[in-house]
Image (cartoon, grey):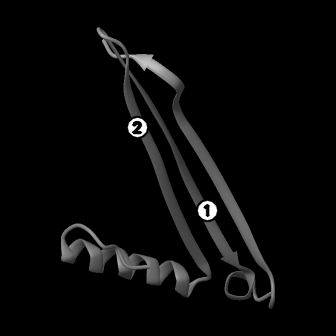
Amino acid sequence: MTLLFGNPEHCRASDLALARFEAVGLVPHTSYVNEVFSGIVSHSELRFSFEGVLQLSLDAGLEKLAGIPGVTLHFSAIYPHGKAGPQPIQ
């Protein structure tokens, strides 16, 4: 995994950290998606909607971790946030 933003020195550090995880059989994954919508309901009322989902997962290769060939465990966590539907702007 290579980060495409930020300071290049930080990118190299994160690549080294990921390489250390992968060397012992752990492969982390992240994903974040958000949506922001706004609109005018009437001539004086503006409303918006914000929602997002953060997904974190980890693949654990048991061949490197415990010497069991051909077995990989997958762990996943999902965190949805935000309020669905239009909310008044205050």
Element carrying mark 1: strand
Name the residue that disc number 1 marks. 57
Q: Is residue 25 left or right of residue 7?
A: right
Q: Tell me the quarter of the picture where residue 60 sits.
A: bottom right
Which of discs 1 and 2 lies nearer the camera? The answer is 2
- Residue visible at 29% across and 8% down in the picture: 44
| Quadrant (top left/top right/bottom left/bottom right) for the C terminus | top left
Q: Is residue 62 left or right of residue 31?
A: right
**Residue 57, position as x, y percentages in the image:** 61, 62
Element carrying mark 2: strand
Label disc, if present, on residue 66 of the rendered structure: none
Depicted 19 relative to depicted 5: above or below: below
| Quadrant (top left/top right/bottom left/bottom right) for the N terminus | bottom left
Q: Is residue 9 left or right of residue 42?
A: left
Tell how many labels.
2
Name the residue that disc number 2 marks. 36
**Residue 54, position as x, y percentages in the image:** 52, 49
Local packing at callout 1 (Cα closer than 10 Å; few below 14, some 14-19, many 20+) is some
Q: Amino acid at mark 2?
A: Val
**Extreme residue in the front direction:** 43
CA gap between label 1 and label 2 equals 25 Å
- Residue visible at 37% across and 82% down in the picture: 16
